[in-house]
Amino acid sequence: MTLPKQVREDLNLRPGDRLVFRKQDGQYVLEARPRRSALDFAGALHDPGRKPLTQADIKSAGAIAAMERDERHLDRD
């Protein structure tokens, strides 16, 4: 859908932005969805009761995940 330039400017829209149409009092209302960045999700997975992982834990988890992936791949063949 192409919106007139004035509407795009009023809503501060850029290419790729998402819009929402909703019906309100018999009329349709156009709203821009807020832009989100990766920083909006910072801390989303934080669990205060969990101890931080060490470098060794991280390397071990990566190796285990790779082995499990390879096993799944071999099972399919």
Image (tube, helix red, strand yellow):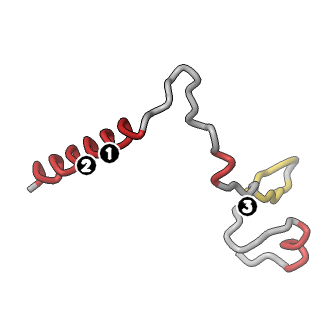
Secondary structure found at label 2? helix
- Quarter of the image holding residue 30? bottom right
Q: Nearer the viewer, residue 55 or 17?
A: 55
Residue at coordinates 28% horizontally, 44% vertically from top-left?
Answer: 65
* Numbered mark located on residue 19 in the image: 3
Q: In the visual, does 50 lie left or right of 8?
A: left
Q: Residue at x 91, y 76 (%)?
A: 6
Around disc 3, counting alpha carbons within 10 Å, would you say few (fewer than 14), some (14 to 19), or many (20 or more)? Answer: few
Q: What amino acid is found at the position of numbered circle 3 in the picture?
A: Leu
Q: Quadrant of residue 9?
A: bottom right
- If the image is split into quadrants, where does the N terminus sit? bottom right
Is mark 3 in CB contact (under 8 Å) with mark 1?
no
Residue tagged 1: 62
Q: Tell me how far mark 3 sits from mark 1, CA to CA.
A: 39 Å
Residue at x-position 50% and y-position 23%: 50
Position of residue 1 relative to residue 19, above or below, is below
Marks 2 and 3, how far apart at CA:
40 Å
Label 1, residues with CA under 10 Å away: few <14, some 14-19, many ≥20: few
In this figure, which residue is indicated by the disc labeled 2?
66
Q: For the C terminus, which image quadrant? A: bottom left
Query: Percent position (x, y) of residue 44?
Result: 61, 37
Indicate which disc, 2 or 3, sits on the residue closer to the N terminus: 3
Among the 4 quarters of the image, the one containing residue 2: bottom right
Q: Secondary structure at mark 1?
A: helix
Compared to 2, does 31 lie above or below? Answer: above
Amino acid found under the numbered disc labelled 1 = Gly
Query: Tag 1 or tag 3, which sits nearer the N-term?
Result: 3
Tell me the residue at 62%/38% (across/down): 43
- Label 2 CA crowd tier, 10 Å (few <14, some 14–19, many 20+): few
- Pointers 1 and 2 in contact (C-beta within 8 Å): yes
Image label count: 3
